[in-house]
Amino acid sequence: MMDWDAIMAVANHLPFAPTYKGVAAASFVFFGFTPLSVMNRLLTADMKWRGLWILPILGMFTLLASFFIPIGYHGTEAIENYVYPWTTTSDSLEMEYGLIERAIFIFSSLYLNLSMLYAIVAWHVALEWFKGGFSKKRHVNPDQTERPLLIKIICGVFVILVFMYVKLLNEQQFFEFGAFVHEWNFGIEAVLVALLIYIGWGRKAA
């Protein structure tokens, strides 16, 4: 059952300044603009943008729900004892008249599919960056089907590093490394945005 007092207790901390680690972890959800460095070739001038105003509203409701619902179900003290709060929360949800009794089956399927989608996009963007960095051509053809040997070697190195990462690190080290990546990623993304703004202003001035 939802505990609204727990939700209000957490919401009362809004006036207090967060830590850098908390800001870095929370800002990760807003870094979806990074793939646009590669996917922007799909954006054309004749695209229709009507109705996009509803996306920030839906996104805000989704973020608030994903943050406050586990706290409402488990309380402010018990929630910190769970490694994956939403997995535990979905396991406690029951659909009495549904074809699937427990909500964890739906949540797990959606979570795995979204994780796989993010991994595919992240690897594709990284590969395209490497292609642009090592290419001698000024403009890289995005529709090129043949991949040079160097790209295949880079992909092979990525695969080896992933297997080494899984084999050599335990769960605690996973979280420590993830926190480290979030902290550094926040600074790098901030510098990247500032650089793009500076380049945009320079073009307007020219």
Image (cartoon, helix red, strand yellow):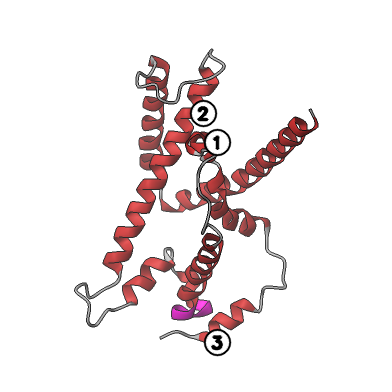
Cα separation, mark 1 vs mark 2, equals: 9 Å
Residue hosting label 2: 129
Q: How many marks?
A: 3
**Residue ID at (56%, 60%):** 53
First along the sequence among labels 1 and 2: 1
Answer whether labels 2 and 3 touch (C-beta < 8 Å). Answer: no
Q: Residue 122: image x %, image y %? A: 45, 40
Answer whether labels 1 and 2 touch (C-beta < 8 Å). Answer: yes
**Rendered position, 157 above or below 32:** above
Left or right of 159: which side holds 80? Answer: right
Residue hosting label 1: 37
Left or right of 109: which side holds 171? Answer: right
- Is residue 74 found inside the magenta-colored segment of the image? yes
Identity of the residue furthest to the top in this view: 136
**Rendered position, 158 above or below 186:** above
Disc nearest the viewer among 2 and 3: 2
For label 1, the crowd category at 10 Å Cα-Cα, with few meaning under 14, some 14 to 19 and many 20 or more, is few
Three-letter amino acid code at disc 1? Ser
Q: Residue 46: image x %, image y %? A: 52, 41
Residue hosting label 3: 5
**Residue ID at (24%, 82%):** 96
Identity of the residue furthest to the right in this view: 205
Residue extent of the magenta highlight: 72-77
Cα separation, mark 3 vs mark 1, equals: 43 Å
Cα separation, mark 2 vs mark 3, equals: 48 Å
Three-letter amino acid code at disc 3? Asp
> In terms of secondary structure, where does tag 2 sit?
helix
205 or 183: nearer the eye? Answer: 205
